[in-house]
Image (spheres, helix red, strand yellow):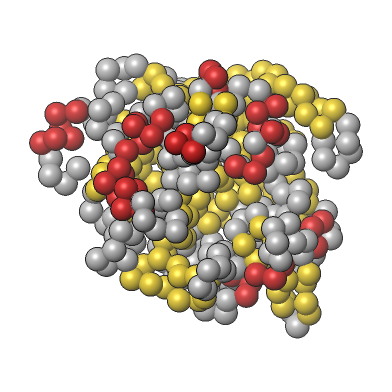
Amino acid sequence: MVKVVEDIFGIATNPFTKKAQVIRRYTLTNTNRLSVAIIQLGATIQSIQAPDAHHQLSDVVLGFDDVAGYTKCREYHFGCCLGRMCGIVSNGEFIMDERRVILSRNYQKFHVDGGFVGFDQVIWDTHMMRPDGVTLRHVSKDGHEGYPGNLVVMIHFTIDDENRFFIRVEASSDQTTSVNISNHTYFNLAGHKSGLEGLFEHRILVESDKRMDTLPDSPVPNGIFASVIDSVYDIRLPVFMGDRVRQFEKSSVAGYDVCYALSKEFNANVTRFVGRFLHPESGRYLEIYSNQPCLRFETANNFPEEPHGEEPILGKECTRYWQHCGFSLQLQNYPDSVNQPDFPHIYISPGENYFHETIYQFGVQESWKCCADPEE
């Protein structure tokens, strides 16, 4: 039995009307005490409370206790929805139906994560409260950030008593347009306050033998899928997060920021196993399932660096968030697919529906099993 509670989280300025608007929060709780809190601002996952092997609850999602935190640290995209197209669009333009579509360029010469006012800044409408969750709705107007068509987007957040958290995104348009919507949440199964030490204790696995390669000194994909075999990116068998992240110390990148190729063929009707993240000390684990062909996995590399004397991000319960204090799992289609003919199709036409499903399966594994089972 799932319980859904609505309360007021705060007040924010609507980016379209420029007027103050109440931000509501919806907290979904199941019989096992797993709870997920969603706020209208950015369709953001504000909190996930999950029990450990000793039945103690901890919030395993990084974020803030108020609207001000989310607006101040907007560039980090804590827990929010990204769209219309997440990721990068090279040169901020692409060819569609034999015409050039020019998008806003909000990062150098690129269009990134939906532009200047992406889905992360939208105050989403509450379409309906459900017995097991909530549905949020937004209409992205024709021409906004350069995108053609009026795009109607519905996000369904639900949980069940098997400790599964579902994110289902549906979209339709009155013109042919490109869609690639994702969620960007920072997790730490040791608890959001555990920092780098807790993160490094995780054992991680992602079922992929290829990653998306990029152009030299550029975030733009080159259309090639590189093998992960015999590299730091090969995590097809469980490895400790700390052991792997430390291997980046002499690299130009401070940790994982990689797009894993899960499938070269996109089929919205097939939801497949993506990976498993385990924190042995608490026993908490997270399994990921999705119908999306790509996983962007990142370890908060761009967070402030404590050894360099930088100011921390002040998160929930006045927690200081530093570099490598969380990891993000962004299920999506491939970035820059509109400019890569060999990447999966990313367009929808009038009468067609976009559908994205990601399932987070939470659970607990006793600590002695973590040690006794070589496969874990």
What residue sits 64% from the left and 44% below the top? 75
Quadrant in which the C terminus appears? top left
The answer, for residue 337, to whether it is visible in the render is yes
Furthest residue in direction front, as rendered: 308
Q: Nearer the viewer, residue 205 or 322?
A: 322
Furthest residue in direction bottom, as rendered: 98
Above or below residue 142? Residue 322 is above
Above or below residue 284? Residue 172 is below
Give the image location of residue 269, x and y in percent. Answer: 48, 59
Say how many tags the image has: 0
The answer, for residue 157, to whether it is visible in the render is no
What residue sits 78% from the left and 69% below the top? 102
Q: Is residue 212 left or right of residue 282?
A: right
Q: Is residue 146 left or right of residue 323?
A: right
What residue sits 78% from the left and 77% below the top? 100
Give the image location of residue 182, x and y in percent. Answer: 57, 50
Give the image location of residue 225, x and y in percent. Answer: 42, 73
Give the image location of residue 76, x and y in percent. Answer: 60, 42
What residue sits 12% from the left and 44% below the top? 374
Q: Is residue 11 left or right of residue 375?
A: right
